[in-house]
Amino acid sequence: MPRRSTAPIVAAQVREPPRSPRGERTRAKLVAAARAVFERDGYLEARLVDITSEAHTAAGSFYTYFANKEEIFAAVLEEVQEEMLHPHVREVAGSEDPVALIEASNRAYLTAYRRNAKLMRLLEQVAAIDDNVRELRLRRGRTFVERNARSIRELQSRGIADPDVDPLLAATALSAMVGRMAYTTYVIGEECDLEQLVATLTRLWANALRIPGDAPPRQEN
């Protein structure tokens, strides 16, 4: 049975940020140290004293920024999420073509997932035994789904994507497809060439939404 904890996991996201450059540096050192300890020892075996030792900070400094292990784990995942959401994918793609954008988005996500595979493996493991971390994982997944649903609605409004597809449900299914393939490839270790994986997932995504291969780019007003 999943373990229930009374400690909040959202506090790391709503706690007031450090007010000084020194405070920002100390918090960043703690988050970086926590990631190293989590990836080395696992979540359950990681100790706060190991995190502060890795960060070369006093134990009291930890409690200035975090209440417990769950909070700093959430902070580590928050940094990774910002990286994996790749908000500047249009600049990366250099195009407004929807298929090119899907391809760039998939490549950015898979590349980031591969770079963070140890942490992604840890997230899946801990979510299975801790209800709080499970909720954190669900919230993280909803962030990706909602972003993709907005993109699908935009394509539908432009007459490019299938108008009969429910944007949120489609985004949930397609995001799950990409996420599961990333997990299978980079955590479980089922070898697959990155470019082949990107091309296949992009084709399946575009086909599912019935996006034509020669879809017109966005028309600027």
Image: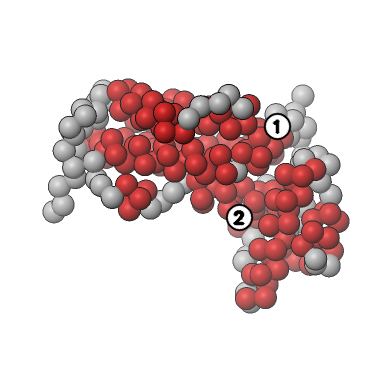
Choose between 123 and 32: the one closer to the eye.
32
Question: Image quarter for residue 115?
Answer: top right
Q: Amino acid at mark 1?
A: Gln
Question: Image quarter for residue 209?
Answer: top left
Name the disc covering residue 75, or none: none
Name the disc covering residue 13, or none: 2
Query: On the picture, is 154 further left or further right than 171?
Result: left
Residue drawn at point x = 54 percent, y = 47 percent: 81
Choose between 85 and 115: the one closer to the eye.
115
The quadrant the N terminus occupies is: top right
Residue assigned mark 1: 125
Does any portion of residue 74 appear in the rendered image? yes
Element under disc 2: helix
Q: Amino acid at mark 2?
A: Gln
The quadrant the C terminus occupies is: bottom left
Residue drawn at point x = 41 percent, y = 28 percent: 196
Does any portion of residue 71 appear in the rendered image? no
Choose between 14 and 191: the one closer to the eye.
191
Instruction: Decide: few, some or many residues near mark 1? Use Cα within 10 Å; few <14, some 14-19, many ≥20.
Output: some
Whole-percent x and y of residue 88? 38, 53
Q: Is residue 142 above or below residue 204?
A: below
Residue drawn at point x = 80 percent, y = 43 percent: 41
Question: Image quarter for residue 175?
Answer: top left
Whole-percent x and y of residue 153? 29, 36
Disc with the residue nearer the chain's start (1 vs 2): 2
Whole-percent x and y of residue 11? 66, 54
Query: On the picture, is 160 further left or further right than 7?
Result: left
